[in-house]
Image (cartoon, grey):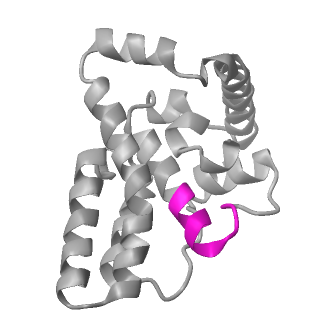
Amino acid sequence: CYMSMSPELWDPDGLGQATGKADVWAWGCVVVEMLSGNRPWKGKQDMQIMFKVISEKASPTLPDGLPQPFDALIRRCFAFDAATRPSARELAAALQLMVDEAEMERRGEEAEAYIAAMPAAAALLAIERRARTAAEAEVLEKDMTVAAGREEVRELTEKNQQYMRDVKRMKGF
């Protein structure tokens, strides 16, 4: 879904090829949707989303009232520079620590919010573990059911790259 595409997926020529950190951005989008009940970038078209992410370096809006550690963790998932986003392992460890602390302090509702985000973090961690070597990553890619949609993503990426080149040319870059 384009609503959860990270900056490097919108502009791989300018920002580098996608890594597992693109999945961390997408995980953040899933959590925002789970917490708010609305998809990130609700009401925006693909090109509007791309402009916000690439040109404005914007990220999805987080719902108000999140506990500070959880809010900070989700915000780290939306770092424009993929290298500064947490890994799936870091996400899982941070969430577990938050659950443990909330349970120790008997903050049940807060612990439930963290626990709700854990299955997606566990899935990311499993993908990260399976994709440690290039050969494993290749097998994983063949196994994933999204392989059928890869051609569509590839075509959109090519269109987006052309759009970015056109925008840069029009701006005189």
**Residue 94: percent from the left, percent from the top?**
23, 63
Which residue appears at 73% of the width and 27% of the height? 156
Q: Which image quadrant: the C terminus?
A: top right
Q: Which image quadrant: the N terminus?
A: top right
Picture quadrant where residue 41 is located:
bottom right
Q: Nearer the viewer, residue 77 or 50?
A: 77
Magenta stretch prevailing secondary structure: helix
Q: Looking at the picture, does residue 149 appear above or below residue 47? A: above
Which residue appears at 66% of the width and 57% of the height? 52
**Residue 140: percent from the left, percent from the top?**
41, 18
Q: Is residue 67 visible?
A: no
Q: Nearer the viewer, residue 112 or 171?
A: 112
**Residue 142: percent from the left, percent from the top?**
50, 11
Q: Which residues are magenta?
A: 30-40
Which residue appears at 67% of the width and 71% of the height? 37
Is 89 on the left-hand or right-hand side of 57? left
Q: Is residue 32 magenta?
A: yes
Picture quadrant where residue 67 is located:
bottom left
Q: Looking at the picture, does residue 7 appear above or below residue 126? A: below
Is 76 on the left-hand or right-hand side of 164? left
